[in-house]
Structures are given as C-alpha cells and as structure tokens.
Image (cartoon, grey):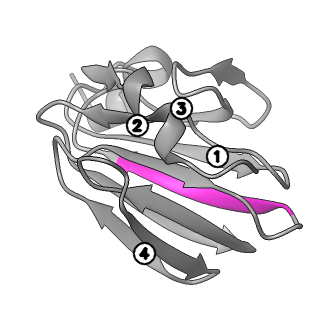
C-alpha cells in the first residue's frame, strides 16, 4: 500500500456519543480511518457537563485543554481533583478511574488521545462512583 493510500483526512462535522455521556467530535480512530494503535477526538464540554465515572482498562489517556477551565476528578474514590486551564495537558494512566467536570460556568474544549484505536475500547464504567462527584 502506497503512502497516498494510507494518508487520510477526517473532515469536521461527524459526532458520536460515548459511554462516558458526552457527544464527541470524531477525529482519527478505528471508526474513521481504521487506526488501531492511537485515536484522537475533540470533546466540547458545556458549563455543568460531567463525565460518567469510568476508566480505560490497559489504555493511557492524554487530554489537552484547548479552551476554558475544567476540573478532573480521579482516584479509586475520585478523591483527587485537579483544576486545569487552557494550554495544560493531563496524563491519565491506564486503569485510573476519572471524570472531568466543567464547573467553571463557561464552555471548555479538550483534545483527547488514547493509546488505542478507539476511545470506546475497554471502557469500564464505574457507576458506584457517581456519588463521589459533586453536583454540577
């Protein structure tokens, strides 16, 4: 297969709803270009939006906040909180429960990268941690 057959462009506009409870802007993934080792999508979060607690089994996550401010709760009981601002990266190691929560009062937008072909691969939902998050 030549390089011109392998290079792909993902046009803006396609979206999907993830198990985490968000509507993502589809980027490079297994679903869009057939990638198997890495994926990248855009996650816009309106004020008050929060993820359902989850972790990615065996998959690392890097999230880059391109706009706004956002909190990320993480840990076995979501007992830790980091506050991020535009321009910061967050590395979430594999198997660590987490849930971003936009309590800033303004929209924020993330670029999210996973060490897997799809951000929906091997998600483990942890509904028992819902009560560990503050109300948004």
Magenta region, residue range: 107-113
Label 2: few (<14), some or many (≥20) within 10 Å? few
What residue is disc 3 on?
52
Q: CA distance from mark 3 to mark 2?
A: 34 Å
Query: Where residue 122 appears, x then y in whole percent?
Result: 24, 20
Q: Position of residue 30 (x, y in %)?
A: 37, 20
Q: Secondary structure at mark 4?
A: strand
- Inspect this view and state whether residue 119 appears: no
Mark sitting earlier along the chain (4/1) = 1
Of the numbered discs 4 and 2, the one sitting upstream in the chain is 2
* Vertical order, 87 against 123 (above or below): below
For image coordinates 80% across by 31% down, the residue present is 13
Q: Main secondary structure of the magenta part?
A: strand
Report which residue position mark 4 lands on.
Answer: 89
Q: Secondary structure at mark 2?
A: loop
In the image, taking residue 97 as reference, residue 46 lies left or right, namely right
Q: Quadrant of the N terminus?
A: top left
What separation in Å lies between label 4 and label 1 (alpha carbons)?
14 Å
Q: Front-most of 130 and 118?
A: 130
Between discs 4 and 3, the one toward the N terminus: 3
Label at residue 7: 2
Between the residue at mark 4 and the residue at mark 3, the CA separation in whole angstroms equals 21 Å
Q: Residues within 10 Å of mark 1 (few under 14, many from 20)?
A: many
In the image: residue 134, left or right of residue 108: left
The residue nearer to you, when weighing 8 against 39, is: 39
Mark with earlier residue (3, 2)? 2
Q: In percent of the image, x 55 and y 53: which residue is there? A: 100
């Amino acid at each position: 297969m030549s390089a011109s057959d392998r290079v792909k462009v993902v046009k803006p506009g396609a979206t999907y709803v993830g198990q985490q409870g968000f509507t993502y802007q589809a980027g490079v993934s297994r679903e869009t270009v057939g990638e198997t080792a890495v994926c990248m999508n855009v996650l816009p979060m309106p004020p008050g939006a929060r993820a359902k607690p989850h972790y990615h089994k065996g998959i690392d996550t890097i999230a880059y906040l391109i706009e706004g401010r956002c909190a990320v709760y993480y840990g076995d009981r979501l007992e830790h909180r980091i506050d991020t601002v535009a321009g910061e990266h967050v590395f979430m190691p594999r198997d660590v429960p987490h849930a971003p929560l936009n309590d800033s009062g303004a929209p924020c937008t993330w670029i999210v990268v996973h060490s897997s072909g799809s951000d929906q691969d091997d998600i483990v939902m942890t509904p028992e941690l819902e009560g560990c998050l503050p109300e948004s």
